[in-house]
Image (spheres, grey):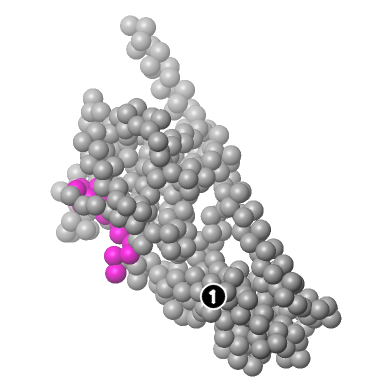
Amino acid sequence: MNSPVSAAQLATLKSANQPDDRDTITLAFDDNRLLSLLFGEHDEHLALIEHRMVVAITPRGNRVSIRGLAPARDGAKNVLAQLYQRARRGLEINRGEVEGAIRMNQSVHDKEASEGTVRTRRKLVMPRTPMQKNYVEAIRKNELVFGIGPAGTGKTYLAVACAAEALMNGEVDRIILSRPAVEAGERLGFLPGDMKDKVDPYLRPLYDALYDMMPAALVTKGLAENQIEIAPLAFMRGRTLASAFIILDEAQNTSPQQMKMFLTRLGEGSRMVITGDPSQVDLPYGATSGLEDALRILKGVQGTEQIKFTTSDIVRHALVGRIVAAYDRLGAKVKSLTQQK
């Protein structure tokens, strides 16, 4: 249970242990005398917040429970906290003040959106380069986005963050994450275990990103109820993926046929993000990458956008950027020598 706040604190917050997108949070206030001013006559201020922010508010003594989708719920919490602080200063609270607090909260969310901020259940994810900001904006505006570039640029991480945000906000019903199970110098058949055991190592980066964005209980529940699906590319054949946020990672290791198959899975109300690094192809020598093929064929197609990262967008260890740049220089030199022969 929450304890009342001290004079130095505004309110304490406690999340109910419900692993879904409609958690209840509770605010506890330390001065009951201010609550009639905060709530309004016949709780009219609470009713206004409920209506405008699409939440359910239940007052009990010095506590207020707020239930709703996470962004609206957290916004209502902020509005009540702001108004309570006003009441503690001895200032009037009327309908106009409540309206103003609601508008102020909305402007904060609008500012976050304009800066490319991604809000997930566990954290706010901020773009760290201009290209990352462009990438997030492209994902929000288009049904199909390609994120292309070297390792460490945040292609997959930001895509998973956007997927978690879309699921949290009710924009999609499920998340589908996929990768081609291409052996980087190894053979699946020689790995121990059943098919799931064999392919899980290839999908581990997707699990890691997902657990970074969502509480473990929600991820476990989502996986059990197929609200979250993480599967090899081959498992996508013959399906129509509607009302889903779909991510294909390591797409440079697809064949043109696989890429076409995956792209045509896109169903009504879905969004798709394709990520990959054309410089790290693990296909047999001479094989055409489905990613490069798709980039060429779909360039300029309405509803799609291609975001191309460079070494300047690498946000891992600074040394990673220098390593990638060194390999790129060598590759350019080899290509130049090959062309001269």
Is residue 235 rendered magenta in the image? yes
Dot 1 crowding, Cα within 10 Å, few <14, some 14–19, many 20+: many
- Which residue is most to the right? 90
Residue 180 picture location, percent across and down: 26, 45
- Which residue is most to the bottom? 61
Relative placement, left or right, of 16 versus 84 is left
Residue 101 picture location, percent across and down: 70, 68
Nearer to the camera, 176 or 327? 176
Identify the image quadrant of the C terminus.
top left
Which quarter of the figure has residue 175?
A: bottom left
Residue 1 picture location, percent across and down: 57, 89
Q: Amino acid at mark 1?
A: Val
* Disc 1 element: loop
Does residue 231 lie above or below 145 as drawn?
below
- Residue 179 makes an appearance in the image: yes
- Which residue is most to the top? 341
Does residue 318 lie above or below 194 as drawn?
above
Residue located 47% across and 45% down the image: 141
Which quarter of the figure has residue 200?
A: bottom left
Nearer to the camera, 206 or 21? 21
Residue located 54% across and 75% down the image: 55
Residue located 67% across and 64% down the image: 103
Is residue 12 rendered magenta in the image? no
Relative placement, left or right, of 187 versus 18 is left
Relative placement, left or right, of 256 versus 29 is left
Q: Mark 1 highlights which residue?
A: 55
Query: Which stretch is magenta?
Result: 224-237
- Residue 323 makes an appearance in the image: no
